Amino acid sequence: MKLSYCAAIVSLMLAGCATNSMNDTYVNKAKSDIKAYKTLKSIESLVIKASSDEDLSEAQLKKLKERICDKADSDSLKNTPEATYMRAQCKNEIEVTIQSKYEACKLFKKAAESSNFYSKEVQSQAMYSTGNCYVNGGFSTNQTLAFNWFKKSADLELAKAQSEVGYQLYWGQGVKKDMERALYWFRQAATQHDTQAQLYLGKYYYFGHIHPQNKSQAFYWFQKAANKGDREAQYRLGESYRYSEGIKRDDLKSAYWFKEAAKQGHLKSGFITAKNYHYGNGTEKDLAKAFYWYKKVAEQDYEEAYLYVAEAYRLSEGTDKNFALALKWYLKAANGRDGFAEYQLGKLYYLGQGATQNSEKAIMWLNQAKESGNREARKLLNEIENL
C-alpha cells in the first residue's frame, strides 16, 4: 500500500504540480520499500535536472523525459491508480501519436475510475484528464461525459476542472445552460487563480450577467487574466483603455495590450494593432509595421484587412509597390462586396496594372462598384462610355 505514495509523487512531478512538502511526505512513506525509494530518488534527480538546466536542448530534454518514464514504468511503481495515471502522462509526453493519445486516455480513465487513490491531487488530475479526452481528443467527442468527469474533479477542488465546469454551464455544452451555476464554479476557480475563470468573471461584470453591469470590476478581472497571458483578456483590456470602460482612457496602454493579444494570434487585436501603427494611435506611426500586421491577419482570413493590404501594395505604403499583388487582395476584398475594392479592380483592369488590360472585366467590376454605391466608379464608367 505504501508504494502508492511513491507513485503519487512521481505522477505529480510529471504533471508539474508537486511541492517540496509533498515530496517529503511521499519520500518518507516510500522509505519502507527500499527498491521503490531508490527508483523514486533516481526519478526525482532526473526531474530536477530537466527543470533546472537551462542549457538543455529540446533533444536532451526529450531524452530525459524518456528516462524518467522508463523508470516510472518499473515494477516497483506499478499496481496503483497513481502509477496508472503516471504511465498515461508519459504516453502523452513522449509518444504523441493518435494511438498513444488513445492509449493514454484509456489509462487516465482506468485511473480515474479507481477508488484506491492515496492522493486526492492525483485523483483529481486523473478525472480532469479523462474529461479532457472527451473534449480535446483521444476519445470520441462527448461533451456530456466530459462534463461529468470535470464535475467529479471539480468536487475535489481542482481549479482548472472547476473552471471547465463553469465554462460548460456557461455555454450549455454537455449540460443545460445555467449562468448562475456557472458563476459559482468560476468563482471557486478564480479564488485559486485560474486564468480562464478570471476572464469569465470579467465577462459577467462587463455584460451584466446575473448581477448588475460593473465595468470597473470587469476591468479588475480582465487585468488579472491578461497579466497571466490570456489573449482574450488582453484584447478586452485594450478595449477598456481605448473606450474608458472601467478605467481612464489611455491610448498607450490600449495599444500595448492589443499588441500583446495580437502576438498570441488574436486576429481582431492584430488588425487593431495594424491600424494603430497606420495612424499613430497610441504608438509611433510606422507603415511597415502596419503592413506587417495587416498582412499577417489577412493571411489568416481576417476579411477587414484585405483592402488595407491591397492599398498598401498599390500605394507602396510600408512595402514595395506591386500592382499584381494589389489586384489579388482587391479580388479577395471584392468577394465580400466592398465597393471601393470593386472600383479599384475596375480601374486596374482598365489601366492594365497588375494584369493584362481588359476593358470587359474593367466594366464588369465598375458596374458592380456602382451598384455598391461607389461614386468614383460611376464617374469612370461615364468617361469610358464617352471615349
Image (cartoon, rainbow, N blue to C red):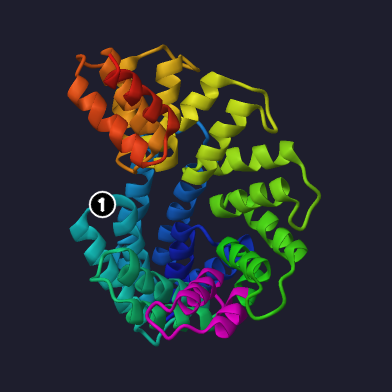
> For this view, does 243 lie left or right of residue 196?
right
Q: Give the range drawn in magenta.
A: 157-186
- The kind of secondary structure element at disc 1 is helix
Residue at (55% x, 53% y) in the render: 232
Residue 192 visible, this orientation:
no
Reading the image, the residue beneath label 1 is 95
Q: In which quarter of the image is residue 225?
A: bottom right
Give the image location of residue 275, x and y in percent: 57, 33
In-image side of 150 versus 371 (left or right): right
Q: Majority secondary structure of the magenta segment?
A: helix
Front position in the image: 87 or 311 = 311
* Residue at 60 percent of width and 28 percent of height: 277
371 in relation to 136, above or below: above
What residue is shown at x 48% (from left), y 54% (from top)?
Answer: 44
- Mark 1: amino acid: Glu
Res 338 → quadrant: top left
* Image location (x, y in percent) of residue 37: 45, 63
> Quick check: 266 above or below 112?
above
Residue 20 position (above or below residue 154)? above
Residue toward you, 283 or 227: 283
Q: Residue at x 77, y 62 (%)?
A: 216
Residue 183 among those drawn in magenta: yes
The answer to which image quadrant residue 250 occupies is top right
The residue lying toward the viewer, choosing from 149 and 65, is 149
- The percent position of residue 109, horizontal first and vertical second, equals 31, 76
Q: Could you tell me which quadrant the N terminus lies in?
A: bottom left
* Farthest-out residue, front: 386
Q: In this view, does 236 lie above or below 121?
A: above
